[in-house]
Image (cartoon, helix red, strand yellow):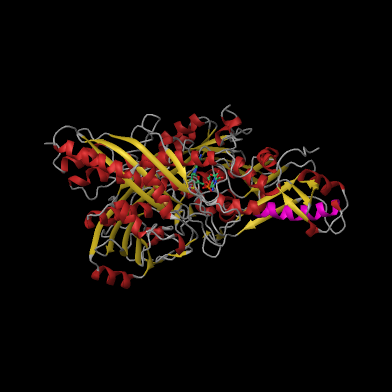
Amino acid sequence: MNDQTLTPEERAANLKGMGCARKRVEDVRFTQGKGNYVDDIKLDGMLFGDFVRSPYAHARVVSVNKEAALALPGVVAVLTAEDLAPLGLHWMPTLAGDKQMVLADGKVLFQGQEVAYVVAEDRYIAADAVELVEVEYEELPVLTDPFEALKSDVVLREDLEGQTEGAHGPRKHHNHIFTWEQGDKDATEAVLAEADVVAEEMVYYHRTHPCPLETCGCVASMDKVTGKLTLYGTFQAPHAIRTVVSLISGIAEHNIRVISPDIGGGFGNKVGAYAGYVCSVVASIVTGKPVKWVEDRMENLMTTAFARDYWMQGKIAATKDGKITGLWCHTTADHGGFDACADPTKFPAGFMNICTGSYDIPTAYLAVDGVYTNKAPGGVAYRCSFRVTEAAYFIERMIEVLAIKLNMDAAELRRINFIKADQFPYQSALGWEYDSGDYHTAWDKALKAVDYEGLRAEQAQRIEDFKAGKTRKLLGIGLTHFTEIVGAGPVKNCDILGLGMFDSCEIRIHPTGSAIARLGTISQGQGHATTFAQIIASEIGLPADDITLEEGDTDTAPYGLGTYGSRSTPVAGAATAMAARKIRAKAQMIAAYLLEVHDDDVEWDVDRFAVKGAPERFKTMKDIAFAAYNQAIPGLEPGLEAVSYYDPPNMTYPFGAYICVMEIDVDTGEWEVRQFYALDDCGTRINPMIIEGQVHGGVTEALAIAMGQEIAYDDMGNVKTGTLMDFFLPTAWETPNYTTDHTVTPSPHHPIGAKGVGESPNVGGVPAFSNAVHDAFKPFGLVQSHMPHDHWRIWKIASGLGMHG
Ligand code: PCD
Ligand SMILES: [Cu+]
C-alpha cells in the first residue's frame, strides 16, 4: 500500500501540509459559478421582504399608513413596530450592551433607518409596495458632529432619558454613551509636564464602510409542523446568531438551525445582527412560509455597520534625543444612533489600548468617550480586529509628528523606540502582554529592501528640482511599523453578549484514512477549507486532499464564536491542531498494539508510527485508521475522532513593516503608488500563497480607506456617499503592485506558533499610505491633514501651503 522508497521529505510534500502554497480548493466551485450564496437559496413558496426606510436622519414618526401597500396584489403583510411590540421584538439588544429599534418606534435616528417591513410574493412587488407605504414624519434637529452632540440640548435617545448609567459605566450627558479609561492618567500627565519635547495633534480616522461584494441577507424558514426554524444568512458568527435568535424569540435553541452558506466577503460587516434578520424570522413565523431578505447596495452602505469615526487627540513626549517617555490620547468616538459596535464586552472601544504600538513606551493613558449622533450604528472591525487600525493609525501618525518636532529621521526614531526582541513577552503600559516579536530585524530588512537611504537621496533631489521649477511632482515615503493584536480570546477577558470567545474543531477519520473536520468559524473567502486541512495534514499525516472541511452549519459544527478579528487561525486553528493531536495520541496506541510493542516504543515519522530504532517496522496513519474500525483493540474504543474546544491563553501579536513610495502631482492632487513593500510576520505560516492573497486584498482595502473611501454626511444627516458612484472602491486601475515579504517569529503559546494575518494589511496599510502623503508635503510645512486623501484634499493641502503660485 505504501511506497517505502520515498524519503521523509517526499512523504511530507505529498501531504500538502503546513508551509505549502496549496491551491485553494474552494476555487473550483467559485470560478465555475457554482458557489451557493444566500441569494442562491430558493425554497418552495418563498416570500420576499423589503424595508420602508426613513429619508430623514432625525424625525418623529407621526403615522404609518399601510392600506395602499396592502391593497397591492401580491403583498402579504406590512409589519411596523406596533406589530412587533406585542412580541417584544420591536427593539433588539446590540452587541455593545445597548438596544436598537428593529422598526421605528416613535422616531428615527439615522437616514435609512428601518420603518416598516413589507412582505410580498416577489422582490419587485415588495419594492413597489415599499413606495406605497405612507409615512408622516416630523423633522427634528440633526446632530452629525459628536462634539456638538455632547453640548446639545437635543436628546437623541429619548428611551434612555434620565439614565445616568450605561452598559459601560456612567453617562455624562444625554448623548454620551460611555467613558473608557486605560493606563495611568496622573503619571502620564506628569511625564508630559516635564518632557523635553511634546508633540500634540488631533488625528481623525474618518467613517468608512467594509462594503463587501455581497450585501447582507437571510432566508428564514419556519416549519410549523416540526417547530424548527432554519435561518440561512451571511453570518460571520452563525452559532452566536443562533443563541441570540433563541434568546430574543423564545424558540428553543435546538429548534433553530443557522446556516452560513458561501459568503461573498464579510470584512466585519456581517458580525452583528440586523433588523432584516429579526423581521424575516417574524414574517416567516406569521406567514408560515420561507421569507428572503437581501439588501441592495445603497441599503448596505447607508445602514449596516460603519467602521472607524474616531477623533483621537494625542500627545507624545520624548527626550531631546528621541526616546519616547509618554503617550496620552483622548478619543471621541462617534457611534451613531445606537451603540452597536461589535467589540468584546469588556472593551467598548475594542483593543484601542494597543495604541502604544511597536514602541517601548513606559507611561501611557487612553480615554475614549462614546457619543450618540444621527448616523448609522455599528462600529465593526473592517479588517482591523476591534479598533486596532485606529490605534495603529494614531501611533504611526504621532511618531511622524514627533519626528518633525525633533527634526529627526522617522525611521530612526522608530528604531530607537522599538520594543527589543529580548523584552518579549512584553508588558505594555496600557495592559497587554505582547507574546513575541522581533521588530528590529523586520525593520532593517524592510529598509534595506526598498533602499531607504537611496529613496531619501532621491527625495532630497526632488525637493531641489521642485524648488527650481523643474518638476511639479513630489515624492513621499510612507513608513509604518505596526503591531496587531488578534485571536480573541481568552474567555476570561473576552466575550460577546456573555458568550466566551473560545473556538472549536471536530475531526473524524474515516476507515479508509480520509477525514472530515468541522469548525466553529466560517470562511467568507479566506480559504479555510484549504488551510485548516493543511494543519491537520501536518499533524496527523493524512494528505490535505483527503480532508473535507465544513463550517457554518450549527446543526453539525461544534460551537464557536465565528470568524472576525483574525481569530480563526489563533483560536480555531489552535483547536484544530489540538484535536489532531488527540487523534495522534490514540493512533499511537493503535500502532503500538498492531506492531506488538509498548506505546512508548513507537515514534512519529511524518505520516506513520515506526518502532524506535527499526524504521522499517511501521504503521501508516491510513493503516491505523482502518484498524481503528476493524480491530477490537483491548482497552480502546473503536473509531478515530476527536474534538477540541480551545480557550487561548493569550492573544497573538502579529506585526509588520510597510513602506509606501508615492508620487504626488501638486497641481491636480493626483497620486500614484510607485512602490509598496509589505513585510508581515504572522508567526508560523500555514499557506504562503493564501497569506500573500490576504495581504494583497488587505492593502487594497487600506489604499481605498486612506485615499478616498468615506461615509460622509451633510449637515442634515444625508449620506453623501451611499452608492458606488461616490463611495470609492479601487479597481485594477488604481491598485498598485505590491511586494510582499516576511519574517517568522512564532507565537510561543499557539500550538503551531501561528498568528493571524488577515487584518494586518489594513492595520499597517492605512498609515503607510497616509504617511506617504504627509511625507511628500512635510518639507513644505505640512504636519497633519485628515484622510481620506482624495485628489481634492491633496490639492487643497498644496494650495494651503502656497504651492499653487
Ligand atoms: N499564519 C497564518 C495565518 C493565517 N493564514 C491563513 O490566512 C487566512 C486568514 O487567517 P486569519 O488571519 O486567522 O483570519 P480569519 O479569522 O480566517 O479571517 C478573518 C479576517 O479575514 C480577512 N480576510 C478576508 N478575506 C476574504 N477573502 N474575505 C473576507 O471577508 C475577509 N475578511 C477579512 C477580515 S475583516 Mo473582520 O471581520 O473586520 O473583524 S477579520 C478578517 C486563513 O485562511 C488562514 O488559514 C495562514 O495561512 N497562516
Ligand atoms: Cu477596528
- In this image, 38 relative to 195: left or right? right
Residue 592 within the segment the image draws in magenta? yes
| Residue range corresponding to the magenta coloring | 578-594
- In this image, 404 relative to 510: left or right? left
**Vertical order, 431 against 121 (above or below):** below
Of residues 116 and 217, the one nearer the viewer is 217
Q: Where is residue 532? Give x, y as percent.
A: 62, 45
Residue 191 visible in the shown view = yes
Where's the N terminus, which quadrant?
A: top right
Of residues 69 and 177, the one nearer the viewer is 177
Across the whole image, how many numbered discs are drawn on residues? 0
Helix, strand or loop: magenta stretch = helix
Q: Residue at x 11, y 36 (%)?
A: 805
Of residues 317 and 336, the one nearer the viewer is 317
Residue 274 within the segment the image draws in magenta? no
**Vertical order, 702 against 737 (above or below):** below
- In this image, 133 relative to 173: left or right? right
Of residues 187 and 591, the one nearer the viewer is 591
Q: Where is residue 488? Give x, y as percent.
A: 52, 57
Q: Where is residue 364? Give x, y as percent.
A: 35, 66
Q: Residue at x 45, y 40 (%)?
A: 740
Residue closest to the far left: 805
Q: Residue at x 34, y 66 (%)?
A: 365
